[in-house]
Amino acid sequence: MRTIMLRAFKKKIVIPAFNVPYLPMIEPLVRALRDTQSFGLIEVARLEWEKFQARSLQAIRETYESCKDQRHSRLHLDHIPVIDEDNKPVDYVTIIRQAVELGFDSVMVDGSRLSLAENIKATKHIVDMTHAAGIPVEAELGAVAGHEAGPVPDYEELFASGKGFTDVREAEQFVQETHADWLSIAFGNIHGAISQARKSEKKVAARLNIDHLKKIRQVTNIPLVLHGGSNIPKEYVQEGIRNGITKINIAAELRQTYEATIATSQSAAQKAVYTHACRILTDTLKINGKASQLIND
């Protein structure tokens, strides 16, 4: 997976990462990647088995194994926080170790709620552990808001102030000291809401500060990750890809598509997810037909 991501970084081909809060979403997402001849990741975050119906790492792995196509997808462990969105400590080392043992292709440790020094320490520990098993690590620096409970901060104020944006010099230090393989950053992006009261709300149409992205790209020189990729205008997405974004996480819009149709039937919900994913791959990301450039070179 490390080689594929570096190849995508050099070729400026973005790799979508589709979150799966519901197990039946996995098959149509894998099929959408295959049918459009795209390459992407199927991923699950801790909150998706804690607050939704992904059930467990084992369940995700087994469901993915039943339909996987290595020419078009891999399995990624998304957000495993050191401190979670409810400000509770997480046994992150145990969870990540379990994912490695289950055969996940890459993992993420999220120390973004820690101080810089603590984030570096936690991330480096995971990097050392997983690199020994040949597994690459994604880390996060900066505050990508949206998952926390409580009132939603005003997006325009957040964007104008740059509050929570990844600090450029800290990013340079972080990458040098942790040896993380790719880095999730904050530069205008925001997560979709996950609380019961707000999870059906349409996600704000976030903008991206491309100038800030360029500065981070220059000092880090590793694949950068855009979290909160749902409903960002495609012109911003494409400009981000041209300037270092190599992985884009897409969760809220696909989850809401599934939730809006599951009352009809599971097959209807799966069909809706498949159609929506194909549209993202071909229209927003424009990576249809590009899987062979990442896998076969």
Image (cartoon, rainbow, N blue to C red):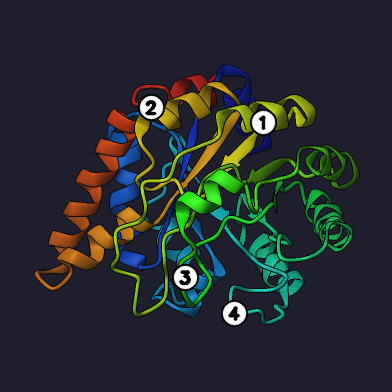
What residue is at 34 percent from the left and 26 percent from the top?
A: 288
Q: Quadrant of the C terminus?
A: top right
Dot 2 or dot 3, earlier in sequence: 3
Which callout, 2 or 4, points at the residue further toward the start of the chain? Answer: 4
Between the C-alphas of marks 3 and 4, the distance is 14 Å
Q: Return the residue at label 1.
A: 3
Q: Which of marks 3 and 4 is nearer the N terminus?
A: 3
Classify residue 275 by image quadrant. Answer: top left
As helix, strand or loop, the secondary structure at mark 2 comes to helix
Q: In this view, does 12 lie to the left or right of 26?
A: right
Residues under numbered marks 4 and 1 in contact, where contact means CB atoms less than 8 Å apart: no
Viewed as shown, does residue 159 lie left or right of 65?
Answer: right
Under circle 1, the secondary element is: helix
Mark 4 Cα-neighbour bin, 10 Å: few <14, some 14–19, many ≥20: few
Disc 2 and disc 3 in contact, CB within 8 angstroms: no
Q: Gap in Å between the C-alphas at discs 2 and 3?
A: 29 Å
Amino acid type indicated by mark 4: Asp
Label 4: which residue?
86
Amino acid type indicated by mark 2: Glu
Q: Name the residue under label 2.
A: 235
Q: Which residue in the structure is indicated by mark 3?
A: 48
Instruction: Identify the mark nearer the N-term, 4 or 1.
Output: 1
- Packing grade of label 1 (10 A; few <14, some 14-19, many >=20) is few
How far apart marks 2 and 1 lie (CA) works out to: 28 Å
Q: Which amino acid does label 1 sit on?
A: Thr
Q: What element carries label 3?
A: helix
